[in-house]
Amino acid sequence: MLALSDRVIAPAHVLIRHLDGESVLLNLETEKYFGLDATGTRMWELVTTSSNIQSAYAVLSVEFDADPTLLRNNLVELLNQLVDHGLLQVVPSDVESVPAI
């Protein structure tokens, strides 16, 4: 289970392509892909460039007019799915990394 204090990064074996506000993620190791709608894409962008999940959540809570608990639950659920599929990796929040392209 992820904590909001965790940080997530895109592993080197993951490719992302943006298409009309949506995205497709490809795990080169498993050759499986995962589609993200516009909201999921924004979540991906923020969590892969923020110092931790909490920072990304803070921005999302300003950008989206949604119930805070529902938004947090949806974010954590998406991130857990992406981690389970090898599309994100949990690292200590003090580790520096280069964001995925």
Image (cartoon, helix red, strand yellow):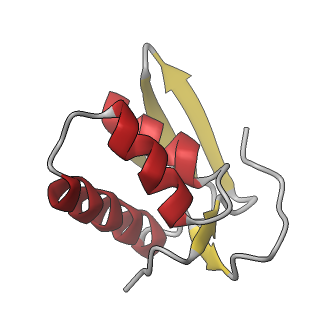
| Image quadrant where one finds the N terminus | bottom left
Question: Which residue is pictured at 49% across the width and 64% down the height?
Answer: 54
Task: Name the residue nearer the viewer: 20 or 47.
Answer: 47
Question: Which residue is pictured at 43% across the width and 19% down the height?
Answer: 21
From the top left corner, tell me how far across and down residue 55 is, in percent.
55, 57
Q: Is residue 36 visible?
A: no
From the top left corner, tell me how far across and down residue 32 is, in percent.
45, 55
Give the vertical position of 17 relative to 46 (above or below): above
Q: Is residue 14 left or right of residue 20?
A: right
The outermost residue toward the top is: 20
Q: Is residue 88 left or right of residue 75?
A: right
Q: Is residue 90 left or right of residue 4?
A: right
Task: Name the residue nearer the viewer: 2 or 100.
Answer: 2
Q: Is residue 56 visible?
A: yes
Question: Which residue is pictured at 28% across the width and 66% down the height?
Answer: 77
Task: Name the residue nearer the viewer: 47 or 62.
Answer: 62
From the top left corner, tell me how far across and down residue 101 is, in percent.
73, 38
The outermost residue toward the bottom is: 1
Q: Is residue 76 left or right of residue 83?
A: left
Question: Which residue is pictured at 56% across the width and 77% down the height?
Answer: 6
> Image quadrant of residue 85?
bottom left
Give the vertical position of 67 relative to 81 (above or below): above
From the top left corner, tell me how far across and down residue 53 is, in percent.
51, 64
Total numbered badges shown on the rendered structure: 0
